[in-house]
Image (cartoon, rainbow, N blue to C red):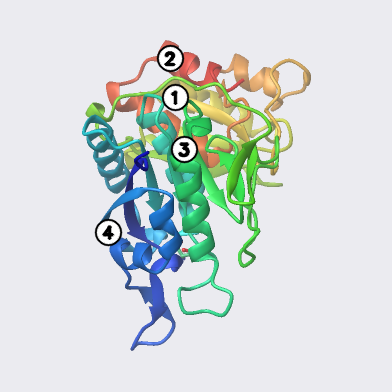
């Protein structure tokens, strides 16, 4: 029986980093070197390795990720059975979500990285690459959208968050837990997520959306300036279930009359409310002023979804229906 065909795309990140002449570690290794460093991969899949970028992940942009999504779509059209994207962990939760929304179909897309550099004692990159390949090669992974695989945990893109700066166990899905684990080399899924609607790569990268966080005593003076700075939309991470100081509510209402404003939460996890609190600045007030609740999406993920929806221009109905899929 022939092995599944996997497309490995590397973008950079700690997993590719080794000590640099200037001090510290920096991206160096390409996809082929990473694959060659894990001989067991040859028993999992036939792999084509491509190095799209060699960047630390804070320097990845939407444009890079749309390029990645297109490369995956082309690869799938050419017969690859799955894709593994290798990148820095700092922005995996954003890249995973973008790929989840942009790449349609049933074939698995798995994103991975490493918390320790390639030369570090106990480097986690090789184990993560092998686990990611096993998940991408498994028929059980079909229909689940983009998955993040690190530390043997399998996370759905819509839930995964980087939750620690250093540990190999940094990736969590605080709302639901991981949806599966790679055990004895085999992916096991404990729950299955239904796919959420996808949006085409043909519309290009997301348009600029500002991500703001409500804070005690803040008077909201910055919000009025945002449309003039060229932001097509705004995501505000409110306090708790989606709340802001009373005086900030009318300012956000005025902003929502100009550009779409989405209400997320600055809490680590949990959906924003829609019908519980009745005081000025609470979720009922903000929704009545035109804000759209982000559901359970984090501010980071809500910002990406809003930026993709607004590629086709401002349309309140489209914004509401895009976020309805995550309530
Ligand atoms: N700063 C690195 C990056 O995101 C960290 C990592 O790869 O884990 O590229």
Is residue 226 shown above or below 288?
below
Asked whether residue 222 is in view, the answer is no
Image point 30% across, 25% down: which residue?
A: 200
Asked whether residue 9 is in view, the answer is yes
Image location of residue 231, percent across then percent down: 36, 37
Extreme residue toward the top, this view: 317
The part of the image, by quadrant, that contains residue 240 is top right
Extreme residue toward the front, this view: 1
Image location of residue 115, percent across then percent down: 54, 65
Mark 1 surroundings: few (<14), some (14-19) or many (≥20) residues within 10 A: many
Task: Find residue 316 and name its label.
Answer: 2
Residue nearer the viewer, 251 or 208: 208
The answer to whether the residues at label 3 and label 4 have Cβ atoms under 8 Å apart is no
Task: Find residue 97 and name its label.
Answer: 3
In 3D space, how far apart are the residues under numbered discs 4 and 2 (Cα atoms)?
36 Å
Task: Find residue 53 and name its label.
Answer: 4
Is residue 196 shown above or below 215?
above
Q: Earlier in the sequence, mark 4 or mark 1?
A: 4
Residue nearer the viewer, 43 or 227: 43
In 3D space, how far apart are the residues under numbered discs 2 and 3 (Cα atoms)?
22 Å
Q: Which of marks 4 and 2 is nearer the N terminus?
A: 4
Residue nearer the viewer, 217 or 117: 117
Select label 3 or label 1 by which is in front.
Answer: 3
Q: In which quarter of the image is the N terminus?
A: top left
Task: Find residue 123 and name its label.
Answer: none
Q: What element carries label 1?
A: loop
Image location of residue 102, percent across then percent down: 36, 31
Q: In which quarter of the image is the C terminus?
A: top right
Q: Which of marks 2 and 3 is nearer the N terminus?
A: 3
Q: Is mark 3 on a helix, strand or loop?
A: helix
């Amino acid at each position: 029986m022939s092995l599944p065909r996997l497309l490995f795309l590397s973008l950079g990140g700690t997993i590719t980093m080794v000590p640099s002449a200037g001090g510290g570690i920096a991206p160096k290794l390409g996809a082929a070197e990473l694959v060659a460093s894990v001989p067991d991969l040859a028993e999992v899949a036939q792999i084509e390795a491509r190095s799209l970028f060699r960047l630390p992940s804070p320097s990845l942009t939407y444009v890079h990720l749309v390029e990645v999504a297109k490369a995956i779509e082309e690869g799938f059209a050419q017969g690859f059975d799955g894709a593994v994207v290798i990148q820095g962990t700092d922005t995996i939760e954003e890249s995973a979500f973008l790929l989840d929304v942009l790449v349609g179909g049933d074939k698995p897309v798995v994103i991975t990285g490493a918390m320790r550099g390639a030369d570090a004692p106990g480097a986690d990159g090789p184990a993560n690459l092998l686990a990611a390949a096993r998940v991408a090669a498994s028929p059980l992974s079909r229909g689940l959208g983009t998955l993040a695989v690190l530390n043997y945990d399998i996370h759905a893109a819509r839930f995964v968050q980087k939750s620690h700066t250093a540990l190999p166990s940094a990736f969590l899905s605080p709302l639901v837990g991981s949806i599966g684990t790679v055990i004895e080399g085999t992916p096991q899924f404990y729950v299955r997520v239904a796919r959420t609607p996808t949006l085409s790569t043909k519309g290009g990268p997301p348009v600029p959306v500002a991500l703001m966080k409500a804070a005690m005593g803040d008077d909201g003076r910055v919000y009025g300036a945002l449309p003039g700075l060229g932001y097509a939309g705004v995501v505000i991470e409110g306090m708790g279930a989606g709340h802001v100081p009373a005086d900030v509510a009318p300012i956000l209402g005025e902003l929502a009359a100009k550009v779409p404003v989405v209400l997320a939460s600055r809490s680590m996890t949990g959906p924003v409310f829609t019908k519980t609190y009745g005081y000025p600045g609470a979720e009922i007030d903000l929704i009545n002023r035109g804000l759209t609740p982000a559901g359970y999406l984090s501010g980071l993920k809500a910002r990406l979804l809003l930026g993709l929806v607004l590629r086709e221009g401002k349309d309140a109905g489209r914004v509401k229906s895009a976020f309805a899929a995550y309530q």
